[in-house]
Amino acid sequence: MSAGDALLPLALVLASMLAVMATAWLTQRAVRDTGWVDVFWTFGSGAMLALAALWPSDAALPERQWLAAAVAVVWAGRLGVYVASRVAKGPEDSRYAQLRRLWGADYQRRLFGFVLIQAPATTLLALSVFTAAHAGEPTLGWRDLIAVLILAIGIGGEALADEQMRRFKATPGHGPIMDQGLWSWSRHPNYFFQWFGWLAWPVMALDLAEPFTLTTLVAPAVMYLILRHGSGVPPLERTMLESRGETFRDYQSRVSVFFPLPPRRVRP
């Protein structure tokens, strides 16, 4: 397998995702809630990752292709249903609300570029999925099992973090900061576990003797940059500092920003 084998499926993924995200932009403009962009991206990405996994190849193992496609669909299904439910029932995501204030009358124009850039991001993720689905041993083995377990931990951990936050917000008279459960070990455990699940792809097929399989590392690298340094942690932390002030600063001083670690004790 070589880079040339991936060009056609990745070009199709990119073109399809550009159409999906353009539709997402039109939809959010019509309903005046940018959160629907995340719903379109999640379900669209799941479909495109499955397409990349199932792309025909004489050299690929069909069982691994179907396994990779199933992994992608399960990831997108769980996350997409959760995000869609949150967007439908709640106010606009605080990150987008903050961008509305910052960009003002230029919001929709600038948002269009912000939305479309997510199509190349999905294409990079699809590269890892394509490689993992079309490489590896000639039979399913222990690496495939470990990859599935990693995905299960990622999905389960993210779902648990989301549920803990949902219960916190639903509790009358709850405090200003959720700092219990997983949220006492990481300020963004949902993002951490979402990233963790992407480690399944290099585990499935990375082989240093086959240089092209290094592309399986692209997905966890891209997701880490997006979640930790892009549209995930930074805007949410800014919003929390604006709304919670010193209470959130105290939380920052005690709890790891991304990777789960034992909470630090702050000297009085």
Image: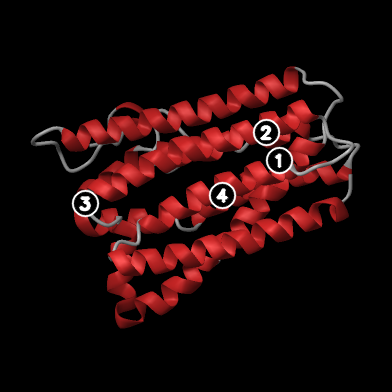
- The structure residue drawn at horizontal position 75% and vertical position 36%, both measured from the top left corner, is 133
Q: CA distance from mark 1 to mark 4?
A: 12 Å
Taking the view exactly as shown, the residue that stands out farthest to the top is 142
Asked whether the residues under the numbered discs 1 and 4 touch, taking CB atoms below 8 Å apart as contact, a structural biologist would say: no
Q: Is residue 3 above or below residue 85?
A: below
Are the residues tagged 2 and 3 within 8 Å (C-beta)? no
Q: Return the mark for residue 45.
A: 4
The x, y position of residue 181, in whole percent, is 32, 26
Q: Quickly name the residue at label 2.
A: 68
Can you give x and y, in whole percent of width and height, for residue 132 in the image?
Answer: 75, 37
Quarter of the image for the C terminus: give it: top left
Q: Are marks 1 and 2 in contact (CB under 8 Å)?
A: yes
Residue 164 higher or lower than 105, as above or below? above
Give the residue at mark 1. Answer: 53
Q: Mark 2 and mark 4: span between their CA atoms?
A: 14 Å
The tag on residue 246 is 3
Q: Amino acid at mark 4?
A: Ser
**Label 3 vs 1, first from the N-terminus:** 1
Q: Identify residue type, mark 3.
A: Glu
Task: Examine the image and state in which quarter residue 72 appears.
Answer: top right
